[in-house]
Each structure stands twice: as structure tokens, then as C-alpha cells.
Amino acid sequence: MMEQRRLAQWLKEHAKFPLIAALLVFVSVARAQIQYSISEEQREGAAVGNIGKDLGIDPRTLKERGFRIVSTSGESMFIVNQNDGVLYVNGKIDREEVCERSTPCLINVKIALENPLEIHYVTVEILDVNDHAPSFPNLQMHLEIGESALPGARFQLQAARDSDSGSNSVHHYKLSHNDNFRLEVKDRGEDGKIPILILQKALDRELTRRINLQLTAVDGGKPAKSGTMEITINVIDINDNVPVFTKDVYSVMLNENAPIGTTVIQVNATDVDEGLNGEVVYSFGQSVNSKVRKLFDINTITGEITVQGHLDYEDKDSYEIDVQASDKGTVPHTTDKSIMIKIIDVNDNAPEIEVTSLSNSIPEDSRPGTTVALISVSDLDSGLNGKVSCSLDDDMPFKLIPSSQHSTYSLVSTSPLDRETRFQYDITLVAKDAGQPSLSSVKTVTVIISDVNDNSPEFSSSPYSFYVPENNVPGKSLFSVSASDKDIGENAIVSYQILRESSEENKITSFININSENGEIYALKSFDFETSKTFQFHILATDSGSPSLSSNVTVNVFILDQNDNVPVILYPVSANGSAEGVEEIPRNVNAGHLVTKVRAYDADIGYNGWLLFSLQEVSEHSLFALDRYTGQIRTLRSFTETDEAQHKLVILVKDNGNVSLSATATVIVKVVEPKEAFAASDVKNAEKDEEENNVTFYLIITLGSVSVLFVISIIVLIVMQCSKSTDYSSKYLQDTNYDGTLCHSIQYRSGDKRYMLVGPRMSIGSTIAPGSNRNTLVIPDRRRRDSGEVSKWLNSLCISFMPVMGKLGPGGQVSLHSFAPTLIKPTCL
């Protein structure tokens, strides 16, 4: 401080030697820092200063030590001479181009020397010279001012611009002489001085319609330079109210990188005038430069200011924008308002996710905790904006485990995996920084679950039930089974085989074979319903995994009856086995006399075993009639003397199958005189009276036993239906081919004896097996009338045990439709 005072005193005393004083000041500054000053527009090669000398370096060593410029903000503008250490100008320097409006304009140069290595910093200040004159954006400006404008009204004019800085920039404005206006200048600092035209005397349109003024801008250079703008003011008769902004101050904070179209602020001004004079439009002020206009836009109707360019906090952190509100009157009124916009620095770098290691697939039997991938995250921001956390969805069987380095994570499994439930996981990783507002990045990692053999084959149905017609073609496919495996590849390839068991059913299954690849089942021989109605076997399905897994299923096969049995004639049967018999009747019998009854049976069941009788051949159609259901042959009229004594009847017996089968029986009817007929009958009856009494007793006992068994069978069927058992016979009963006779009686004659077959014949699904309760009764051969009465009595006895089970059908058939809906019209004959 004392040295500075002494220096100041010495300069004051030697002020008459300005060159010496300037040199001493420069030396004082050089001791603090090496800095040079040159004026702009210097010629190329002009010397700036001797750096080597000022640094105290021997000029002879400069070249050896590699004296050079290594870094500078204007490297192309300067060069150094390695011989003498002088810094020279390398080309013309225009301060306005290099520093625009920055003050002061400084260029930093870094100087390097080697052996030993030294780095020195040199600052060159570019001094401005007054080489630009002020200029206005427009050479002419038109204003319309109503005569009702009050003194003191302010009209902002376009500001002049001068590329020079400091004192060489715009210094003041001058307005040509007039009686109505005066000029006021508003200093905006960096934005320069703004001229404002102020009305100081009211205008009178009738005296003066137009006023021409000249505005002159003068800079502070020596000599000074100036620029002019012509102002034309039209005085018109307009509205007398100006728009008024609703707020005194408009200020807003805006984030950098705000999207284009973002609303910054909305200004609002009102005008109490009516019509066009009260409608307000908005615009930027005349002083708003082109750069600001590229960044912001204003809606002329709503006054909404929006972003239309890229905002960067690093470029500029605030903007002050003039907004004008004008009405639509003939002579618009205008009001100015300044809008202050402050830019806020934001977190504008999103985190980055990198998968450094990823397994292509993991087995589904992997233990929890298996590492799947290594994840690293990073963020170009710093501080909280660069602090990144990584996460994934909670519904995934995986989690992230951070490592000792916070930027690295391990992706591991958290629970057992099942490929059959889900074979692929698309894991979404979310990296989020701690900025406000925070930024995040998303990356999807795909994890494939590989298969292991952990699923046994599963059959499409269990158990299987198939219905196979009898007399099938050997070697032809009967049916097929199918099993699937939820695994894939070799683990899902299924092969089939039949489990052979040492049982009675193995006799049948020994003729069954299966295709090991597709499950097709074949029979090596034909089935016979009358021999076997159902059988069961087991099939094993095995996959091709290692080790392999298997499962088995039960297959129930039900044989369907076909019409493959020809009706068998039980009566008449001759001694040689042919179906031919002889009947003798008196000539004097009346019409309706029962001659005989043809009896037959069919081993098939249902319609295939339902027999119908018809006359295929008869010598006299007018004498005999045949009941198509019972096979009874009766006379149609009395015999006459002219009728022949012997008649031949050929009876056709056929079943009701789709392709019916038939048999024929021949009955020879001999007409004899009454005495002969009765004599033969008395002899036979006398011989067998005692036998008939015994047979009647046994017949009653037999019928009672059959009835009891029948009632028990019906009760068992009801219990089975009510319990809804899964027994396979219930399925079998649903087939319409299964039909049968619940109570059946057949009478036939063999020699001197008459036979009656009595017993229930049930369907395959009932609890009474076919033929298991048939009984053969031998009864004496009494009169045919008695035989017919016994048949009717037996039939009525059978019906009496079923009063609520059905109704009597044609030919004495009883339909059990109301009792057993799963049976197809079982009958009682």
C-alpha cells in the first residue's frame, strides 16, 4: 500500500513525462501478471510484446527449449518468434467478431518451454476502436397518435445498435426540435439505451395532421459517429383509453430444455373502450432482439408466451422481454410491460444400463440364488443427479443384489422355476437417478428357462371307455389312446405299451396290440358278444427323458352286439332235427281255433333278437292265419266237406336287425274226423294225468323263484342308478343297441313231452347275466287250450310283478320305459 502511494505521488510529480509514466505502470502490472493490450484492426505481424524478455529468459535458449504456444482461446490469432521471444499478431483481429459485446475482451495464451518444463500464462486484451457507427433497425418509423393523447404519454422507439463497446457504443440520442415531444433515454445495461418519445404538449389534429421528427444516435468515440432514423407521426382521432396490464410485475421461472410449445407465462391487459378500441393484441416490444424472438413466441390474441427454441441454462440464465399490449382502435393505444424469465438448471442426463454378463438360459431346476446376469449402471451427471439406483418388477422370481461397487448389481433367482408354467421371463430393469425431477432408463433382459424331465405323461382321459362292435376285422385299428407330456424335446416324446397281467382277462388282452408311437390299438382276432361282453386292460405311457417318467391308464372295452345269429326254431322240430311238424285238428273246429304255435329264439339281444312271424307259403289262404308276434296259427273259418284233408304251411321267422336274418318252419295240418282226434287225445291225457299234477306243483314253485329273483334284480338296478356309480356298465347301458327281455317264456314239444323255458333275459348292463336264471319245465301234454291258458297265466304272472314298471305292448310285450330309461324297451313275453 505504501509503495502504491509513493508511485502515485511520483507519477503526479512527473506527469509532464507521460511516456515514462505509462511505461512504469506497465512494468508494475507485468510484475503481477503478464498481460498485453493491443487495439483491434492491427495489421498482420504487429508486435504484441516480448514474452521472453518479460519472463527473464535468455533469448538464446528459447529455440532449444521449444518455446511455443500450446493452448490459447485464440490460437490462430497469435504466433511467437523462437529467436527473440516476441508475440506477433497472426492476421487481422476484429474485436466485435472475437468477443461480440463482452467487456473486457481477453484472450488467454499458454506458453510452454522444455528442459526444464515450464508453463506460463499470457493474457492479451483487445482494445476497442470506434470503427462502427450507430444504426437503427429501420431507417423510418411510423407512429399514429390520437389527438386525445395526454401529455406524458410515452412511446418506445427502436433502439440503435453499435457493434463497438464501452465508450465507443451508443452514448446518447438527440431529437430534432419540435413543440410537442421530448426524448427520454432508458439505460438497459447490456441491452443498451432505449429511446422513449414523451408527449409534452397535447396534439390537435385540426392544426397539425402529421409531424416529422429525426432521431439521432451518437456514440462516445473520438471523433464521434452517429446514425439517424426518420420518425413520422400521424395524428388521428382515436379512442382515449390505453390497455392496462392486470399485474404490475410479471416474473416466471422456467426449466431448461423445456419442450417446444411449453407455455411460459400469459400476460393479460384490459381496455375499457368498446368494440375494436377495446380489443387488445399483444406483441414483443421493438427492443426485443432476434435471438430472443427465436426462443420465444407470443400469441397475439391470448398473450400467451410459449417456447419455440432450445433453452440452455449454460448459455443464459435469464431473459427480460418487453411485451406491448395494443388495442384495435383506429389509432391504437400501446402499453409496455417487462417480463422477467429465469432459467432453472435441471437434471438433463438419463442413466445408462449395461448388461456385462448374461446366461443364455438356466435350467428350471436351478436353486434359488442362481446368478443370471451382471448389471452395471452409470450417469453422466454428478452429485445427486448422478447417483443411480436400479430396480425391477416385484412379480418376478428374480431380484437385484448390489455389489460393493454401487454401480454394479447381480441378477439372481429368488424362487424355484417351472418351465411348464413360464418358459421365458422378460425382466424390465429400471435405473433412476436422484435428481429433481429424476430421470430413468429402462432395459429389458430376456431369461430363457431350459427344460428338465420333471413331468410324467398325462392321458387325455382316465379311464378310457370304448365300444367295439363284435365281428371286427382282425388287424384293423379299433381305437387309440393319447398321452401328452408338458416337457419339450426328448422329454416330451411318449411311447406306449400294454401291461400284461396274469389274470383271466389276459386271455383276451393277449390278442390286443398297440402302436408304441401313436397309441393306435389293434385286435388280432374278432370279438364275439355272446362269448365276452366286456374286458379291461392297462396301457403304460413312458417319455424319453433321462431318467424316464411314466403313467398308466385303465381301458374298458365294451363289445357291441351285432345281428350275427340266425333265429332258431324250437317248435316244430322233427326227429331228424329239421323244423317240420304235423298237427291234427278235428274238422268241426270253429273259426279262431288254435292250431299250433311256432316257437323260436335268437341269441342276439334287443331288436336283433326280436322275432316276427309271417306265412311264406300256405295252401289255402282263407283257412289259416298267423299272429306275427306270437307265432300262433289259428283257423279263419270252419272246415267244409270240400276242403282238403291236409294243408302245408311254411312259416318265415326273421329278426329285426338292420340286415335281418331268418329261418323257416314247415307245419303240416291234417284235418281228421272228430272221433279220431278225441280218441288219440284221451289216450295221451290218461297216460300223463299223474305227471301233469306234479308238473303243476313244480311250475308254481319255479315261477315264484323267478319272480323273487326278478324283484331283487330290479331293486339292485335302482340302487345302482341312484348311486350314480362310475362302474363301466352304466356307460354300457346308454348304448341303444343293448336291449333284452326281462321275462321270457318259450314252449315247444319234443316227442310226447311239452317244454316251457321260463327266465329273465337282461341287458349286459344289468346285474343279472343273460341266461343265468333260465329254467326248463316239463309239463304234460294236455289240450292245446290248456297250454294256451298256461301261457296266458304265466304272462300275467310276469306282468303282475311289474304293475308300475311299464305298459303292455303288442303281442304281450311289456315296455319298461318308465322304470329304466337307460334300457331300450326290454320286454316280457
Image: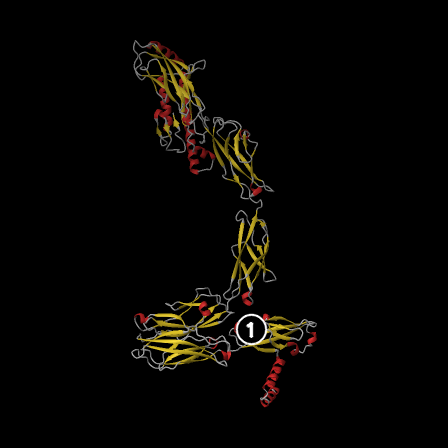
Say if residue 12 shows up in the picture. Answer: yes
Is 720 above or below relative to 402? above
Identify the image quadrant of residue 136: bottom left
- Nearest the viewer among 803 and 623 is 623
- Nearest the viewer among 62 and 441 is 62
Indicate the position of residue 309 as horizontal and vertical percent values: 46, 66
- The kind of residue tagged 1 is Ile
Indicate the position of residue 735 as horizontal and vertical percent values: 43, 32
- Nearest the viewer among 737 and 128 is 128
Say if residue 780 shows up in the picture. Answer: no
Identify the image quadrant of residue 770: top left
| Secondary structure type for disc 1 | loop
**Residue denoted by label 1:** 93
Is 203 above or below relative to 457? below
Identify the image quadrant of the C terminus. Answer: top left
Apparent side of residue 299 relative to residue 162 in the rendered image (left or right): left
Identify the image quadrant of the N terminus. Answer: bottom right
State the scheme by which the image is colored.
Answer: secondary structure
